[in-house]
Amino acid sequence: MKLIYKLLFFAASVTTVIGCRKTENLDVDYSSFNADNPQTNTALDQWLKTNFLDAYNIEVVYRYNRYYHGNTANVTPNKLEDIQPTMQAVLDGFIGPYRKVAGETFSKKYIPKEFVLFGSYAYADSNDPGVAGTAAGGRRITLYGLNDYAPLPDGAFYFWDRQRIMHHEFGHILNQIIPIPTDFESISKGYYKQPYKDTPIDSAHKNGFVTSYASGVSTEDYAETISWLLINGQVWYDNWANTASAAGKSRLIQKEQNVITYYNNLGINFKELQREVQLYMKNTLSLNESKFPYWLTKKVFTSMLLDLKSDVYLKYGSSDVFNQVYNQVKTAVNALPNYGLTFNFMKINFTSATTVNLQISFNQGTNAYVADYPFNMNVSSATGEVNFTPNGPWTGNATLLQTSVQPMLDYLSNNTFVADWLPVSINADNYMKYGGFSVKGSPASYFYGPLAY
């Protein structure tokens, strides 16, 4: 049986989670819970039967039964009103993405046939931080802690944590059926250490682990890598790797590729699965790490290239409104008298969390030059709205080209934009690798490009 423990804390954003245990004294008043009435065919039973038993042959056990947690743990029953919203999240954020990407046959074959639910975490004694989930025998996932439920938006961490546990435990389920590739453990050989709680998150990060919990043993490392790639997304993972040591970054990249290959061998495109999970995290849970505006405020990206000659615009289309402004600038630069200039492309450089510059690349003969137009950038993580305000005066080449570039300067400064991963139809391999801005209230007016770290 595989165990996953509670996280330490969640403050402001998922990124601040550091570790996998939470010290919590066992002080549970059992009298505060109503005795579970073991009747069948309640409205909840009917809903569970329709959505789990009939659809996937999955039994959901929510009535308290000591058999499912053994005699060494102290566990409290569920609050009945928390079960349906929790299991709806399991359907939407876990089963749904697998069914869409892996197909019905895979989902019915591999998704566990039994989910067991408990209200509290599982405590062995008053000093136990609590077990959050288990996977057993390739067929059962046990979820603890349902009594922490709160509806959205206040319950954002609760729902994020359910997805964390579900995807982690299902990683174990798959590994119990199809073993972890033998070369995975060698990636971090010599760096696994128990007890994992003695490894600070900074050390785990530097050494190429997504959490301290992952640094304890290779099997947990594998499940954690799967889970965090899915629930926090590619940009979070890339940033985690880029801010590790050089060796840690290399290990994280190797682990990601190992997971992708493992899923490919199961007939699952891991990148497509990741995108589907991220769409749930972004659109339903509104998690910051799944949003482009959030990462703009973190100065993770260095630039966005805007080059209408790129094949990506032929494949995914572009905005006629933006194209007109872009080509107007291009024509004006090329026609600037007495200089013989050739326009190359534009680029948005993210110079800080609150500033950018619009860079125009151009040639004079064989010599390459740039003109930079700085802007203040105000980003709302809540709404995704972005405003660009000129932060002149322009100097050097910017002054030389200003009249030619003015239409683009006006386009940026005269509109409120909404930042998002664009284009929405981009393939899964490039999801979160492209970003863009659409004019608020005028979605047909937008621009996007590849993002660089």
Image (tube, rainbow, N blue to C red):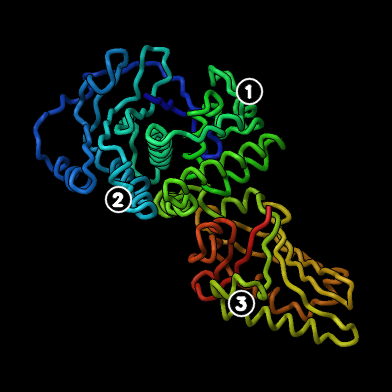
Q: Quadrant of the N terminus?
A: top left
Amino acid type of the residue that numbered disc 2 sits on in the rendered structure? Thr
Whether residue 282 can be seen here:
no
Local secondary structure at mark 1? loop
Could you tell me the amino acid type at mark 3?
A: Phe
Q: Nearer the viewer, residue 36 or 2?
A: 2
Q: In this image, 391 relative to 67: left or right?
A: right
Q: How many marks?
A: 3
Point out the tag, 1 or 3, that comes first from the N-terminus.
Answer: 1
User: Which labelled disc corresponds to residue 325?
Assistant: none
Image location of residue 278, percent across then percent down: 46, 51
* CA separation in Å, label 3 and label 2: 44 Å
**Dot label at residue 105:** 2
Q: Which residue is mark 3?
A: 322
Q: In this view of the protein, which residue sits in the foreground, 68 or 11? A: 68
The residue located at (69%, 59%) in the rendering is 303
Residue 148 vs residue 282: left or right? left
| First of labels 3, 2 by sequence position | 2
Label 1, on which residue? Answer: 190
Mark 3 nearby-residue class (10 Å; few <14, some 14–19, many ≥20): some
- When asked about the image quadrant of residue 244, the answer is top right
